[in-house]
Image (cartoon, rainbow, N blue to C red):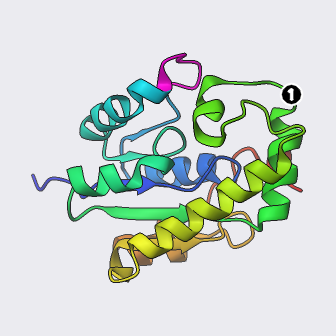
Amino acid sequence: MQKRQKVFGIGFHKTGTKSLRKALEILGYSVCGPVGARNHDIARDAIEIALDHAARFDAVQDNPFPPLFRELDAAFPGSKFILTTEDPDIWTARAVRYFGEQTTPMREWIYGEGSPVGYEDIYRTRFERHTADVLKHFANRPEDLLVWALTTEPGWSPLCKFLDLDIPAKIPFPHENRGQSQA
């Protein structure tokens, strides 16, 4: 049996990560994520957690994986990366609405603030910087990166074309968490 190519969902939460996960599962991937959101030592443990889970699953998505795309790329050469994207203003409003004032160590590690409320500019800037960093990292390897506005352009075609897989017959593309993610 041929070993399945690793797939890393490196888009930030609230960009269609749950739909990506479900789509990958339908395509036969074992998928992990998110993990470690409440780990108070996530800043110290994130790389170890990410590499451990990435080794055990065909695909990972959501936190802590997106900020660690460089480490994942180095540890798993030849992998495919999917950056789910969103308009930064829509994404920021969605994060505020979904997370509210609830804080987590994971968001504190990623953004410097555990809650987006009152820190919208910090969250938006970090989101935009992540996208720019990913695009720069993969600038000379476009075949390894799918940049996908999944929340506004869902469907099997971009994903299956990128992964060189057939579109599942008679299975609609999943739309997970739709009510909570719309702007």
Residue at left 83%, top 42%? 119
Residue at left 40%, top 54%? 69
- Lateral position of residue 52 relative to residue 32, left or right: left
The image shows residue 115, relative to residue 74, as above or below, that is above
Could you tell me residue 63's position as x and y percent? Answer: 53, 39
- Lateral position of residue 167 relative to residue 182, left or right: left
Taking the magenta stretch, the answer to whether it contains residue 173 is no
Q: In the structure shown, which secondary structural element does the residue marked by tag 1 occupy?
A: loop
- Lateral position of residue 109 relative to residue 68, left or right: right
Could you tell me residue 14's position as x and y percent? Answer: 71, 49
Could you tell me residue 170's position as x and y percent? Answer: 56, 65
Can residue 140 be seen here? yes
Residue span colored magenta: 36-42
Residue at left 86%, top 42%? 96
Q: Which residue is mark 1?
A: 101
- The image quarter in which residue 132 lies: bottom right
Towards the viewer: 17 or 94: 94
**For mark 1, does the 10 Å Cα neighbourhood hold few (<14), some (14 to 19), or many (20 or more) residues?**
few
Could you tell me residue 162's position as x and y percent? Answer: 41, 75
Towards the viewer: 87 or 2: 87
The image shows residue 73, relative to residue 36, as above or below, that is below
Q: Where the C terminus falls, by quadrant?
A: bottom right
- The image quarter in which residue 103 lies: top right
Taking the magenta stretch, the answer to whether it contains residue 41 is yes
Main secondary structure found in the magenta portion: loop
Can residue 27 be seen here? no
Towards the viewer: 144 or 68: 68
- The image quarter in which residue 108 lies: top right
The three-letter code of the residue at mark 1 reads Glu
Residue at left 29%, top 37%? 51
